[in-house]
Image: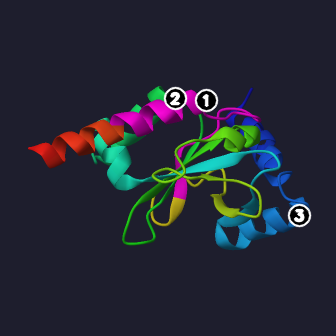
Amino acid sequence: METHVLDRLIAEWLARAHPVPDQVRAEWSSQGVALLPLGRRFAAVRLSGVLVYAALDSDDPGVVAEALAERLRGPVIHDNRAAVSTYYALIQWHAGLVWDYNRSAPCLRDDTYLGVPRIDRREPPGTYWVVPPRYDGDLCRPQAVRDLVDAGHRQLIQQTLV
């Protein structure tokens, strides 16, 4: 399947997470990012850049993108607009019901909106896909996200002991 056709299918899948998909398309067209409600089609785990960089032992954008793609095998959004870099790993909405890392890597779902970039926004500035979805319905495995959080915690503890 051609890339532009696949990207269109993925964009439609994302837009249908909103009760008014046309609003999403309009926001993508005018702003490059649309606010999508979480908890209906997917949830998002908020990962601080500090935690991600510790888990991957790098803050190099290319290394981080490659490692996240390999380890999480699903879509990840990077928001670097604030002073603190933040990543959002998209997971199944129901995984948030039993998510046990809410203090350090909260799972955002019901009553939360996430800024989701247009499918072709794959580099800074602003919010972009560090790992874009590969197909409609593509999501990170919750256990892979847990493993990344655990690795980051272990590394951060090691750094404080040194």
Rendered position, 77 above or below 62: below
Which residue has dot 3 on it?
22
Which residue has dot 1 on it?
141
Q: Residue at x 43, y 72 (%)?
A: 82
| Horizontal and vertical percent position of residue 149 | 43, 39
Which residue has dot 2 on it?
144
Rendered position, 58 above or below 108: above
Pointer 2 with pointer 1, Cβ within 8 A = yes
- First of labels 2, 3 by sequence position: 3
Frontmost residue, 38 versus 99: 99
Mark 2 Cα shell of 10 Å, populated few (<14), some (14-19), many (≥20) = some
**Kind of element beneath mark 1:** loop
| Horizontal and vertical percent position of residue 159 | 17, 45
| Label 3 – label 1 distance at C-alpha | 29 Å
Where are the magenta residues, as a range? 128-151
> Can residue 46 be seen in the rendering of this structure?
yes
Quarter location, residue 133: top right
Screen quadrant of the N terminus: top right
